[in-house]
Amino acid sequence: MSASGWIEIAIYVAVLTALTPVIGGYLAGVFEGRVAFLGAVERPLYRLLRVDPQGGQSWRAYARTVLVFSALCFVVLYAILRTQTIHPFNPQEMSSGTWDVSFNTAASFVTNTNWQFYGGETTMTYFSQMAGLAVQNFVSAGVGIAVLIAVIRGFAARSGSSLGVFWVDFTRAILYVLLPISIVGALFLVSQGVIQNLSAYASFSTLAGGEQTLALGPVASQEIIKVLGTNGGGFFNVNAAMPFENPSGVTNFFLMLMILLIPAGLTATFGRMVGSRRQGWTLYVAMLLMFSVAVAVVYVAEANGSPAQQLAGIEGGNLEGKETRFGIGSSALFSAITTVASSGAVNAAFDSLTGIGGLVPMASLSTGEVIFGGVGSGLYGMLLFVLLAVFLGGLMVGRTPEFLGKKIEQREIKLVAIGTLAVPFLVLACTAFVIGTPINAPSVYNPGPQGFSETFYAYLSQANNNGSAFAGFTGYSQPNGTNEGASGISWADGLGGVAMLLGRFGPLLVALAVAGSLAGKRVSPAGPGTMRTDTGTFVTLLVAAIGLVALLTFVPAFLLGPVVQGLSDQLF
Amino acid sequence: MRNDLISSALAVVVFTLLLGLAYPLVVTGLAQVAFPNEAGGSQLTRSASSAARGERAGEVVGSRLIGQDFRGRPRYFQSRPSATRHRADATFFNNLGPNSRALKDRFDANVARYVRREGVPASRVPADAVQFSASGVDPHISEDNAAIQARRVARVRGADLPRVRALVAEHTDGRGLGVLGEPGVNVLELNLALDQAGSR
């Protein structure tokens, strides 16, 4: 551990906290219609899409539009990945992906997961990267933000049942937020060394007389939206560890900031839209607390080093699978950020983390990606936990639970229970099923507990739409290193793809249903007996509720994998 | 439902054109104009002085951001060990777990090799010198690692140790803004500079 590592972490927290009300206020302005400088672009666009921007959608109508749009995106992306031989921008003459890996990848990008069974620079045409994957980076993020805004309207509504118009929220998320930040951010990244070109790969003889080939491509334009939209799918197979994606400590910090910028800012947006900035800060503080613990644990664990390294007598911490320019501090920070957010971009190899270091990403995922979480999806997931905490608090003091003046009743609590438990159930069911059958064997790389961790992490990550991986786990066998002659491991691809789709659209529908149910409720003024939800006590209650659900569900699995390894010097 | 389908289809077309073609192509154009060197991969070329042995000056010799393999060439600083043999067109992680026997065996072998090559006791072997980088093409080594290797490089080349150390310092990338990340010595740039200095 170094002082500069802790200083970087402190600076990160300070900058993120300072930016939260700024970006959050801007977002509130955009979605309440006060920021409208692109009206001249919007109006013809809505006419073209045949949308009435003044209309309103019930939660069911809103959800239906989301589902139809996402389904169509899925089909189009799948078609793109399967027809690579006819693509323009294909200087490396890549062939098409197999059906199973393409299914997994299409599910992965439409659900904002960006799990990678494919290897970017060995299998994807530049056209697939730009018009397929990067488009879904924008779109899935835009959908997440739009749905969250609709959910917030349900919480804030004083009357009526309209949650807004999906196409307006979605279009505004793209035009006012994601696209402008991406253009500026991409150019900044290029200025720091991230590549951006459409050239064929460059081969040359190296200084020592060997051969090397540089994979090139339009990286910066994809890198920025990959972090800004908490997507995380790398242009390159090794993601943000690749110097062409992330060349320096400065770009690394910038990428980390972009990952949490919108998820953190949305807490402030929530506060403003429900008329209580303090309520927004309460959620931010709860998230920041859990995040801080995650960072500290992973940093200390990695600085301690792995059993393999200690037995080999190597001092200086676990640098296996880490880059020199990031060291242990910036790798630990990145790893915590990318897993509390549902980003899944990585700048270090997760499979090579120490036992306890690897437990941290798992624990972050097991909260259901609500500590900041994905853009939009993190906060609507968190709001379900808020209702759960309110309910638990209500039971303790013996009063009808209320949140923001609205009574939380049977229907909401049923939905909350489904919303918070469905994904953990999905994870455990998938893991147990494949571990108990021979179908999992071809996917696993490491023996012993690490092999279990790889499998468990694969379904934890996919079902929670994160996308980071203990990357020894594979669903694609590429004997030639390309799509040529490659075959997917259909079980892993298919089950993973289904887990991603259920893990995305299940909680999304539940959150919209809760919002729809709350939208029509009367707001009763707070009385002396009302349990306050914007205090330190509530933060404690909320963190405890999240911890309780995650721990009760996942502790046995943690014990079988990372904890065993963290407590033992045994080699496998 | 039908309206949703029509709007969705139109939206897929519009946003693919905007976000999938216009956006990346405009950014590519701007990047090529404003930062042509960086956008193209920060490629390094052989200078006239270092292109002695039948190589052409101006030829690309690598990228300053992508590490190369110098094993078996003791006149050069050695990069970190790589799972991919420094392939830059098919990257992957090594993925051995923290309690892996294979990992421990590899560490032992790497430590022994480093001790043999540099003549330092095993307890002084820097962590980065024996553990795989993440990308497989890490362009840097730690300052410790470079300081140890400097003796051997100077000896093999018959060069002045202080001169070699000065070149190491010159090709050290500090922490970003003084605090972000870790400092590292850029191996390819350093070795290019050594060749250049040697042939003067």
Image (spheres, grey):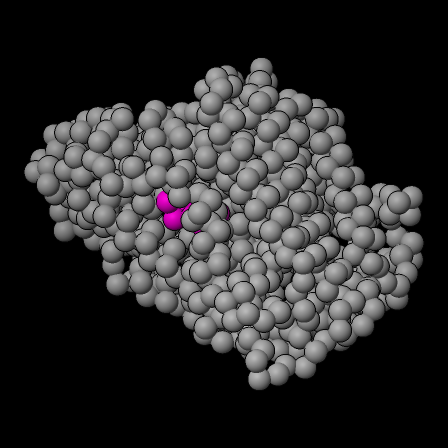
Q: Which of these two is toward me, B157 or A526? A: A526
Residue at 50% x, 67% y is A396
Of the 4 image quadrants, the one containing the C terminus of chain B is: top left
Residue at 44% x, 47% y is A552
In this picture, residue A197 sits left or right of residue B115: right
Task: Count all numbered tags in the image, as a single digit.
Answer: 0
In this picture, residue A157 sits left or right of residue A114: right
Most extreme residue toward the front is A398
Residue A366 seen: yes
Q: Which of these two is toward me, A471 or B120? A: A471
In this picture, residue B36 sits left or right of residue B4: left
Residue A83: x and y in percent read 72, 26
Determine whether A33 is above or below A444 in the image.
below
Dominant secondary structure of the magenta stretch? helix
Residue A19 seen: no
**Residue A386 magenta-highlighted:** no
Residue A303: x and y in percent read 26, 50
Q: Which of these two is toward me, A175 or A144? A: A144
Quadrant in which residue B79 is drawn: top left
Where are the magenta residues, as a range? Answer: A359-365
Residue at 83% x, 69% y is A160
Residue A42: x and y in percent read 83, 62
**Residue A364 magenta-highlighted:** yes
Residue A95: x and y in percent read 65, 22
Residue at 48% x, 17% y is A438
Of the 4 image quadrants, the one containing the N terminus of chain B is: top right
Q: Which of these two is toward me, A71 or B127? A: A71
Most extreme residue toward the bottom is A528
